[in-house]
């Protein structure tokens, strides 16, 4: 559509065009992605080959100090005045060898079977010499990670030794003092980023990898190391159950249909929970910030005070207020001659109530964020719009909303992703109810599942809340599904937000 054709559209048509163009741009983005894949693969192959070329040069075109670095990490640095760097690499190599001999190799040897002797399989008295599948899998994962890190440190040591050798040949020596100076100067960002990267690996990457691995096992109540039993690899069995196969417990199509229903409700909930809080909170902030509104500090203080109340107290209180038999709302309705309403017992009504309560709880947070941003919008823009005869609605659509979306775009995306995993509101308000009928409950993986449960609350009920019949393997499959959804929305929509694409314009 040309610019003239677009300008000839009315407001409603322009809005529908923008919405349609947004969703149409998603397939085009995927097409552009796949067109770039060959170029990325070519660049990847060059990067994969480059380390081998470096190692070859270090072996062929260097002295014995560099060659010994292939066996003794840090030897090339220690013998060329970079003692601190070399000693650190050597210490890690010694620690790695000790760990692999004492822990890594014995555990990796049992990775295929995840143990052979469970606690309950021991004959001839009590002993501590039994296997634990959970520990074996975890230590094998750590061993692989330590090995990858060892390879990186080893390669860095050899490469650095070759660089120091080349510098020495032209009469230049780089000491520990110069190395530390570089780290505190042009490489200081490496030190700053190392802490969050380490935290990311420990608290995010390792749990995600472990969760994926658990999805390929039969880890459940009947194969639980805490009960003295072992679990083993079952391949794609849990995934086949999730995607419609009969699986290990039957009812595959029921499971697939249920997953789709829970996924649909999860996305609907995340959409309304995010945008209702966002726009209503923004409207409240705009009303408070308007000229002529008295007691602005009072209204802000009242809303801030609601945040001071722990959310779980507010949600439990609202749950009691919406109770069918002795709830306050039903008491008022009955006092006025009306019938009891099962607020949290009807699926559609329960979902509406949950969204409304979440809006009531979340508006103060959004109001605070929007208030600070509204105060930074140049007043000249509003004065110019008023002189040009723009209505309040048009001023909001052309000035306030674009500015707010530009600033809060990443927050909006993170809020949407957070609501996908919003455990508190669902669990404390409705407990996931109302529950499905007996046909659904007859499948073990669906026990205690309610029609307002999200994927995250379903995972909780399948594991922590159901210790007598927990299925950690299938729950891990749902966890992978949640991770895929969150990654999709985070990467796709964040990359397409104006806050990222037009960052320089704002600066």
Image (tube, grey):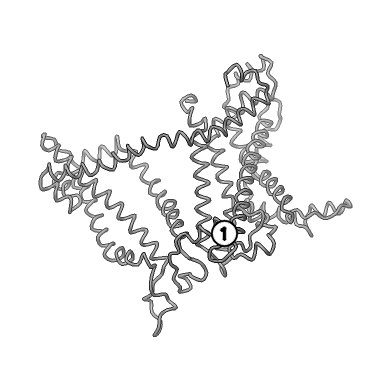
Q: Quadrant of residue 430?
A: bottom right
Q: Quadrant of residue 365?
A: top right
- Most extreme residue toward the top, as rendered? 387
Judged from the image, the secondary structure of the residue bearing numbered disc 1 is: helix
- 227 displayed left or right of 305: left
Local crowd size for mark 1, using a 10 Å CA cut-off: few (<14), some (14–19), many (≥20):
some
Q: Return the residue at label 1.
A: 460
Q: Quadrant of residue 281?
A: top right
> Residue at coordinates 20% horizontally, 42% vertically from top-left?
54
The x and y percentages for residue 199 are 41, 49
The x and y percentages for residue 473 are 50, 62
Number of disc labels: 1
Most foreground residue, 364 or 157: 157
- Most extreme residue toward the right, as rendered? 337
The x and y percentages for residue 485 are 53, 46
Most foreground residue, 358 or 303: 358
The x and y percentages for residue 415 are 57, 42
Quadrant location of the N terminus in the rendered image: top right
> Residue at coordinates 10% horizontally, 37% vertically from top-left?
169
Q: Is residue 391 positioned above or below 244 on the image?
A: above
Most foreground residue, 256 or 466: 256
Q: Is residue 136 positioned above or below 454 on the image?
A: below
- 374 displayed left or right of 45: right
């Amino acid at each position: 559509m040309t610019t003239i054709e677009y300008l000839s559209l009315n407001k409603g048509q322009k809005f529908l065009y923008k919405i349609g163009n947004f969703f149409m741009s998603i397939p085009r983005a995927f097409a552009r992605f796949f067109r770039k894949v060959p170029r990325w693969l070519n660049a990847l192959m060059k990067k994969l080959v480059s380390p081998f070329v470096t190692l070859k040069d270090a072996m062929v075109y260097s002295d014995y100090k560099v060659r010994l670095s292939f066996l003794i990490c840090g030897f090339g640095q220690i013998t060329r005045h970079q003692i601190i760097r070399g000693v650190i690499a050597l210490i890690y190599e010694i620690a790695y060898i000790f760990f692999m001999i004492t822990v890594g190799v014995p555990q990796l040897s049992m990775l295929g079977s995840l143990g052979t002797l469970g606690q309950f399989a021991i004959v001839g008295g009590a002993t501590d010499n039994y296997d634990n599948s959970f520990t074996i899998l975890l230590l094998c994962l750590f061993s692989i990670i330590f090995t990858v890190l060892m390879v990186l440190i080893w390669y860095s040591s050899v490469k650095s030794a070759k660089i120091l050798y080349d510098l020495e040949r032209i009469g230049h020596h780089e000491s520990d003092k110069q190395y530390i100076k570089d780290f505190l100067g042009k490489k200081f960002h490496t030190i700053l980023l190392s802490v969050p990267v380490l935290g990311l690996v420990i608290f995010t990457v390792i749990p995600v990898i472990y969760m994926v691995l658990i999805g390929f096992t039969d880890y459940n109540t009947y194969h639980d190391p805490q009960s003295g039993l072992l679990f083993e690899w079952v391949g794609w069995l849990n995934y086949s159950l999730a995607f419609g196969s009969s699986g290990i417990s039957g009812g595959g199509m029921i499971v697939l249909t249920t997953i789709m229903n829970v996924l649909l409700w999860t996305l609907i909930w995340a959409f309304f929970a995010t945008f209702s809080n966002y726009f209503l909170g923004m409207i409240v902030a705009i009303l408070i910030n308007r000229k002529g509104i008295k007691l602005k500090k009072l209204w802000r203080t009242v809303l801030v005070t609601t945040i001071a109340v722990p959310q779980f107290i507010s949600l439990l209180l609202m749950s009691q207020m919406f109770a069918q038999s002795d709830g306050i709302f039903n008491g008022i309705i009955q006092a006025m001659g009306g019938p009891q309403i099962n607020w949290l017992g009807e699926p559609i009504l329960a979902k509406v109530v949950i969204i409304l309560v979440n809006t009531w709880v979340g508006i103060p947070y959004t109001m605070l964020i929007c208030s600070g941003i509204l105060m930074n919008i140049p007043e000249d823009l509003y004065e110019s719009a008023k002189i040009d005869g723009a209505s309040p609605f048009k001023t909001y659509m052309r000035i306030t909303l674009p500015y707010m979306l530009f600033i809060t775009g990443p927050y909006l995306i993170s809020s949407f992703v957070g609501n996908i995993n919003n455990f508190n509101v669902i669990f404390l308000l409705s407990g996931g109810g109302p529950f499905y009928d007996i046909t659904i409950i007859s499948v073990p993986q669906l026990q205690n599942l309610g029609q307002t449960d999200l994927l995250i609350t379903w995972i909780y009920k399948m594991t922590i809340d159901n210790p007598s019949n927990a299925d950690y393997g299938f729950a891990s499959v749902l966890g992978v599904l949640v991770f895929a959804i969150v990654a999709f929305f985070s990467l796709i929509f964040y990359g397409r937000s104006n806050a990222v694409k037009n960052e320089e314009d704002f600066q």
